[in-house]
Image (spheres, helix red, strand yellow):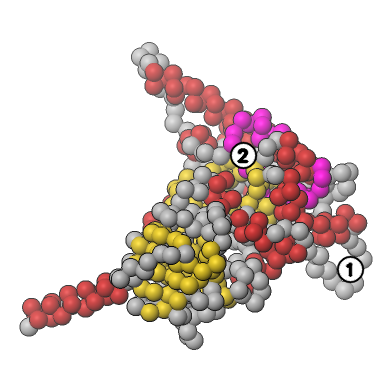
Amino acid sequence: MKKLLLSAFLVLCASAVAEVPSTVAIRNAKIVTVSGAVIAKGTVIIRGGLIDAVGENVAVPADAWVVDGEGMTVYPGLIDGLSTVGIAGAAPAAAAAGGGRGGRGTPATPATPTAPAAQAAPAERSWGPEDRPQTTSWLLAADEIQAGDRRVETVRGAGFTTAVTFPTRGIFGGQGSIIDLVSGEKAAEMILVPAAGQYIAMGRGGGFGGGGGGGGGFPSSLMGIIAYVRQVYLDADHYRLVKEAYAKDPRGMQRPEYDRALEGVLASKRILLPANRLVEIDRMLRFGAELKQPMILYGARDAYLPEAADLLKKANATVLLSLKWPTAPVRSPDAEDTDTLRMLEQRDKAPTAPAVLQKAGIKYALYADGLDAPRDFQRAVKKAIDNGLSREDALRALTLSPAEIYGVADRVGSIEKGKIANLVLTKGDIFDDRTTVVMVFVDGKKYTPAETAAPGGRGGASTDDPGPGGNR
């Protein structure tokens, strides 16, 4: 009897494995490769989680699950270049970065969400930079990722298949990781690149323009934060030189004391610095050059200004541009304060920034900035398109451009043979409000977004149904 039950169990296991589509063929679909020409009607073959073939006259393998893509468009999966997705408890957005007063001689505008939430580190009073206040530079997002984070499913429904996600506590938040947005029991399955860069905030207390620094101690101002960051990099240079000298000839030399904060700084491939207003863009470009680190500016709300574009172009800067456009603050009916001309101009002109950067030839990518809901995200991109950015450039700014910025364009960002099978199938243009995301492939695994899933479904992974129009 036991042998019979064991045999039945093995047969059931074998059947379950057989249902998993390791090879998928999406045929008769429009294919937007991003890196090359658009294929009006073609086929994409997925095998073993990779793109095995793509083209007009690609033969469908006999063992493939077939998805009839008639009337659909296949896009590369979108990439969110600055996110907290996958880190449980991390809020999707925070207040404006940088501190200080506005550019062109105007007061700073009220805080507008423009970056992943920077959380304050534990409130312990700091007396100086030697205390390493508000610093968790050694943290690695890959070690913080939670496979069960429900935001993964939400953003995947908008067409995102990859995110560069960061721990954001304090001034030195830690190193971000590039993750593929698969659902599973093991977070390790999500990690594409474990270390992508060091997240730095310029707000007091690790926020973006509010709170007290280091529990009331140092640093307690923007000037103090900048001085602290500068000192950390000076310390890191000295630390590195001492370690190298000791490694070369340790005899007669006292061994250097291990400093995990400086180890985290030295291990970072690049740094991310906040800059929204014109004055902040100028300040952070100068500061980044002083630190002599590969640098990405994030936020860039004032990038629409000709002066800002000139500064960015001259510095050959790389920019992550927030899609969370400035909006009017919520006021009580009896409020007497009114919007300044500068605030009104910013609200009107900020969505033109992508087109300005594109025209100037500045390296940039767009990021969702906590716009997790698919419709909110689509409307934000559509607003940039309505303000001069072409659809093709908008798509590139959310696919191949962030992949190039983070050095993973050989793996993701476009539909090419040999790349990871991160794909989005839609009915309609991917950035239109009425468009439906029919299915998403991440690492070759098929997911059905909640909006298009069967009634009662949650849009999770599907391995026994090739989806609308599909045949085995």
Q: Is residue 17 left or right of residue 30?
A: left
Residue 289 within the magenta-colored segment of the rendering: yes
- The 10 Å Cα crowd at callout 2, few under 14, some 14 to 19, many 20 or more, is many
Quarter of the view holding residue 46: bottom left
The residue lying at 62 percent from left, 39 percent from top is: 295
Mark 2 or mark 1, earlier in chain: 2
Highlighted magenta segment, given as a residue range: 286-307
For mark 2, give the secondary structure: strand
- The 10 Å Cα crowd at callout 1, few under 14, some 14 to 19, many 20 or more, is few
Image quarter (top left, top right, bottom left or bottom right) of the C terminus = bottom left
The residue that mark 2 highlights is: 295
Quarter of the view holding residue 217: top right
Q: Is residue 447 left or right of residue 386?
A: left
Q: Residue furthest top?
A: 252
| Contact check, label 2 and label 1, Cβ < 8 Å | no
**Amino acid at pointer 2:** Met
The residue that mark 1 highlights is: 335
The residue lying at 21 percent from left, 78 percent from top is: 12
The residue lying at 47 percent from left, 84 percent from top is: 454
**Amino acid at pointer 1:** Ala
Residue 179 visible to an observer of this rendering = no
The residue lying at 49 percent from left, 22 percent from top is: 241
Q: Is residue 439 left or right of residue 217?
A: left
Image quarter (top left, top right, bottom left or bottom right) of the N terminus = bottom left
